Image (cartoon, grey):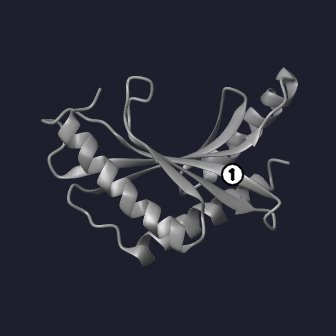
């Protein structure tokens, strides 16, 4: 488990991100680290498809040893895009398509984990970075655009 001091800093950063998400009208919640959930995690719903559905987005900081990275931290953005049926043929079809998308994608990557298609991006940021609203709003917009433009080719 990550140290208490680092968890407290990550929790403050996630709260700052949560306020930005609230401004763009995304519902969110933050879970503190515990024995069950080893990392502080922000959970948000991203509406899409004209509000008919929503994607589940999880943000957390990837832990590193204190002597490993002095000047940067890693923010993982993980979005569940689609739940797949239990049909293994469907999963194989999607895996093949996802591989092709990832070969040409310039931003993040798609994958399948536990029967879910996900999009993942790890953002490298300075250790004492203050999240600016417009920066983060634009980043989320870019992620949504990336998912929407690539996900349509999966179906």
Left or right, 72 with reference to 112: left
- Residue, x 21% and y 55% (percent of image)? 127
Q: Position of residue 87 (x, y in %)?
A: 87, 23
Q: Position of residue 31 (x, y in %)?
A: 45, 42
- Callout 1: 10 Å neighbours few (<14), some, many (20+)? some
In the depicted structure, whether residue 140 falls above or below residue 76: below
- Residue, x 86% and y 48% (percent of image)? 155
Task: Give the residue at mark 1.
Answer: 55
Q: Position of residue 83 (x, y in %)?
A: 76, 37
Q: Nearer the viewer, residue 140 or 44?
A: 44
Q: How many labels sit on residues? A: 1
Q: Position of residue 106 (x, y in %)?
A: 54, 57
Q: Quadrant of the N terminus?
A: top left
Left or right, 128 with reference to 17: left
In the depicted structure, whether residue 53 falls above or below residue 24: above
Q: Quadrant of residue 2?
A: top left
SS at circle 1:
strand
In the depicted structure, whether residue 104 falls above or below residue 85: below
Left or right, 2 with reference to 85: left
Tell me, yes or no, if residue 99 can be seen here. Answer: no
Q: Quadrant of residue 140?
A: bottom right
Q: Quadrant of residue 41?
A: top left
- Residue, x 75% and y 43% (percent of image)? 82
Tell me, yes or no, if residue 18 can be seen here. Answer: yes
């Amino acid at each position: 488990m990550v140290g208490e001091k680092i968890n407290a800093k990550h929790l403050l950063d996630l709260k700052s991100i949560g306020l930005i998400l609230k401004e763009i009208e995304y519902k969110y919640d933050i879970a503190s680290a515990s024995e069950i959930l080893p990392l502080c995690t922000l959970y948000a719903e991203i509406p899409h498809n004209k509000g008919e559905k929503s994607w589940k987005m999880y943000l957390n900081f990837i832990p590193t040893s204190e002597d490993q990275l002095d000047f940067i931290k890693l923010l993982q953005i993980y979005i569940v895009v689609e739940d797949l049926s239990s049909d293994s043929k469907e999963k194989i079809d999607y895996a093949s398509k996802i591989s092709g998308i990832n070969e040409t994608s310039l931003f993040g990557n798609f994958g399948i984990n536990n029967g879910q298609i996900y999009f993942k991006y790890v953002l490298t940021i300075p250790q004492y970075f203050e999240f600016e609203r417009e920066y983060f709003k634009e980043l989320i917009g870019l992620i949504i655009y990336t998912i929407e433009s690539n996900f349509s080719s999966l179906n």
